[in-house]
Amino acid sequence: MTMPKLDHLLAATDLSAPSRHAVERAAMLSRETGASLDLLHVVDRAPLERLRELMLDSPDGLQERVLGAARERLGELAETLRERFGVSAGARVAAGPVLAELARQVDETAADLIVCGARGESYVRHSLLGSTAARMLGKATRPMLVVKQVPHEPYRALLVPVDFSPSSVRAVRHARSVAPKADIALLHAFEVPFEGHLRYARVDEATIHHHRVVARQDATRKLLELAGEAGLPPHAARLVVTHGDPSLRIVEQEQELNCDLIVIGKHGQNVVEELFLGSVTRHVLAESQGDVLVSV
């Protein structure tokens, strides 16, 4: 099966230092995959209106000055990317509600992947809710790469946690499209159903252990089937099956396997558990060290 190919990337930037890392990663991906790249900066009109009231300036005059300054800075950034990475990036500046404008630009450019910054140390460490990146993720209809680290080299080791929901195959394919040459590990973290209840009912440890063995064997078989369905050649992926809370095991395995990118579905099997973003995905976004690609 042919892996999907990236054709167009859209890197959203607020022109801050943390978002610059995302733009540089997008340029690196563009160079590696041959995908075209657009940079996007959206000027939110609401703060402009408040600023206009303080400055007693005309709405149109102030907006044009702000948009003009943004175009200049974005143009300079695009030129820097051309010099450093040999990539010719388009520069798009728009005014309006950030999420609505982003959605419009994604459709207009037919972007395969949205790239954004994690906004430094504060990103989701305390609360994902309320941040622009989180709201973008909640509304995203395209895969979205959240960049946390300064990019120094192409991604070399991918971790793809799967729960065998329909999003799992898409996540593997998206991982391959972003980093076709990287090593890939498929991870499934399992828990024995009602294990706590079994202990409370004084079921002996040997019986519980047997259930774990069976669950592990079943997960290994499903991982092999999933790898084939996603189009991975035999033995192309490392298969990791571990017992425990998926949220914790994913972050542990990221460190243990020295992965620099986690690719995870926006929702798992329990879509209703979160209105916009699955709880495991939210935890990974908050606690992982490396970049995170959220597949949709």
Image (cartoon, grey):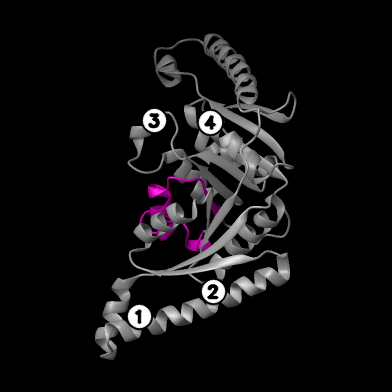
Label 4 or label 1, whichever lies nearer to me, is: 1
Q: Secondary structure at mark 3?
A: loop
Q: Is residue 131 magenta?
A: yes
Q: Nearer the viewer, mark 2 or mark 3?
A: 2
Mark drawn on residue 168: 4
Q: Which residues are magenta?
A: 118-147
List x then y, in percent, for residue 217. Answer: 62, 14
| Total residue callouts | 4
Determine whether label 4 and label 3 are within 8 Å by CB: no
Nearer the N terminus, badge 2 or badge 1? 1
Q: Is residue 6 above or below residue 92?
A: above
In the rendered image, residue 107, in percent from the top left (x then y), is placed at 43, 52
- Select label 3 or label 1 by which is in front: 1
Q: State the residue position of label 3.
A: 270
Q: Nearer the viewer, residue 249 or 1?
A: 1
In the shown orientation, is residue 214 left or right of residue 276? right
Residue that label 1 marks:
63
Q: CA distance from mark 4 to mark 3?
A: 13 Å
> Which amino acid lies under the numbered mark 4 shown in the image of this protein?
Ser
Instruction: Please tell me which of labels 4 and 1 falls first in the chain.
Output: 1
Q: Position of residue 269 (x, y in %)?
A: 43, 28
Vertical placement of 198 versus 57: above or below?
above
Seen at 55% across and 16% down, the residue is 215
Left or right of 149 in this view: 100: left
